[in-house]
Amino acid sequence: MTHVTSTPAAPHHLRDLARLRRVRDRIDREYARPLDVEALARGVNMSAGHLSRQFRQAYGESPYSYLMTRRIERAMALLRRGDLTVTEVCFAVGCSSLGTFSTRFTELVGMPPSAYRRRAADTPPPPTSSGTAAGVPSCLEKQVTRPIRNREAPTAPPPLA
């Protein structure tokens, strides 16, 4: 006979988790549109404060931070292509201020977008039929190039347990 040792989650907690997933999915889909926490909260019938607290608890960052991470990820891909200016990329990913975009990009990637674009242009990977570097699957390329906040990057490898 199997015994369950944990108690089932409260229905309201499960409902909140479902709403948080809808918010995260909306951010992933609509990152290039004007989005703010109030609009995201209204879309799932939550207050902005409650959404922010619950989102941070569930995903480890605020909805705004998650949105900016998605925008910067997309900006990195567009800058690697090399056919758009930094300003064009800024607006293409939904940012309305070049200054804010550049500051956030530098914070997340560790270098300004113009330097990132130059570096990508100096060392282009050999393209394959899928458009990625030879032998590197696109899912791995995305994982490796995902921005990490400088202040949140681990300083030492995690201990093996």
Image (cartoon, rainbow, N blue to C red):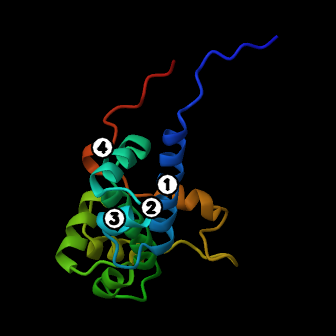
* Residue at the left extreme, as displayed: 99
Q: Marks 2 and 4, how far apart in space?
A: 29 Å
Q: Position of residue 73 (x, y in %)?
A: 42, 66
Q: Report the residue at 61% width, 65% height from top.
A: 138
Q: Nearer the viewer, residue 31 or 4?
A: 4
Q: Nearer the viewer, residue 145 or 36?
A: 36
Image quadrant in which you'd find residue 5 = top right
Would you name the residue on which mark 1 appears?
Answer: 19
Of tags 3 and 1, which is closer to the observer? 1
Residue 89 vertical placement versus 71 (above, below) = below
Q: Report the residue at 39% width, 75% height from top.
A: 122
Q: Nearer the viewer, residue 4 or 64?
A: 4
Q: Are marks 3 and 1 in contact (CB under 8 Å)?
A: no
State left or right for residue 83 relative to residue 47.
right
Q: Marks 4 and 1, how far apart in space?
A: 27 Å
Q: Secondary structure at mark 2?
A: loop
Image quadrant in which you'd find residue 71 = bottom left
Q: Are marks 1 and 2 in contact (CB under 8 Å)?
A: yes
Q: Marks 3 and 2, how far apart in space?
A: 20 Å
* Comes first in the chain, label 4 or label 3: 3
**Label 4 sits on what residue type?**
Glu
Residue 143 vertical placement versus 102 (above, below) = above
Residue 1: in sight, yes or no? yes
**Label 3 sits on what residue type?**
Met
Counting other residues with Cα less than 10 Å from the Cα at mark 1, is it few (<14), some (14-19), or many (20 or more)? Answer: many
Q: Marks 1 and 2, how far apart in space?
A: 6 Å
Would you name the residue on which mark 4 appears?
Answer: 152
* Comes first in the chain, label 3 or label 2: 2
Would you name the residue on which mark 2 appears?
Answer: 44
Counting other residues with Cα less than 10 Å from the Cα at mark 4, is it few (<14), some (14-19), or many (20 or more)? Answer: few
